[in-house]
């Protein structure tokens, strides 16, 4: 996570825009043999809201994980900004 916070620009190996989604981004994290993904979206140019994390076990991101992240993004937008 520190790489995503500190590097400019962040290498695509760690942060990538997900095609076929409602502007979701994927943060890639590996710890030992475990691979994790954190999905989120940019609310402002430098503010990323993280919506959903899961352990990745296949090459392709499961559709159900994308659906959860998109639903949480819609909810966040409807509720408005609550972090300042």
Image: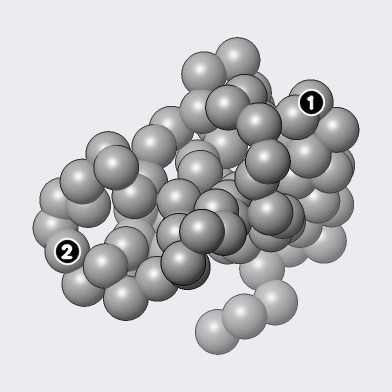
42 or 56, which lies in front?
A: 56
Position of 79 compared to 66: left or right?
Answer: right
Residue sitting at the far top: 20
Specify few, some or many for label 1: CA neighbours under 10 Å numbering under 14, 14-19, or 20 or more: few
Q: Is there CB contact under 8 Å for labels 1 and 2?
A: no
Which of 67 and 49 lies nearest the eye of the viewer? 67
At horizontal 80% and vertical 51% (from top left) the residue drawn is 72
Q: Residue at x 70, y 77 (%)?
A: 82
**Residue 23: x percent and y percent?**
55, 31
> Is residue 43 in view from this perspective?
no
Q: Secondary structure at mark 2?
A: loop
Could you classify mark 2 by the number of other residues whose Cα lies within 10 Å: few (under 14), some (14-19), or many (20 or more)? Answer: few
Residue 80, numbered label: none
The quadrant of the rendering that contains the N terminus is: bottom left
Whole-angstrom CA distance, mark 1 to mark 2, is 29 Å
- Occupied quadrant, residue 74: top right
Q: Is 17 placed above or below 2 here?
A: above
Q: Measuring 43% from the left and 32% from the top, which residue is drawn there?
A: 17
State the residue position of label 2.
Answer: 7
Residue at the extreme front of the image, as rendered: 33
Residue identifier under label 1: 63
- Taking 5 as reference, is 72 above or below it? above
Comparing marks 1 and 2, which lies closer to the viewer? 1
Q: Residue furthest left?
A: 8
């Amino acid at each position: 996570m520190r790489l995503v916070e500190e590097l400019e620009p962040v290498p695509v190996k760690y942060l990538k825009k997900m095609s076929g989604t409602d502007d979701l981004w994927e943060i890639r994290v590996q710890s030992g043999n475990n691979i994790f993904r954190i999905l989120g979206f940019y609310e402002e140019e430098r503010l990323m809201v993280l919506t959903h994390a899961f352990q990745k076990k296949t090459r392709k991101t499961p559709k159900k994980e994308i659906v959860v992240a998109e639903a949480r993004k819609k909810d966040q937008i409807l509720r408005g900004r609550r972090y300042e």
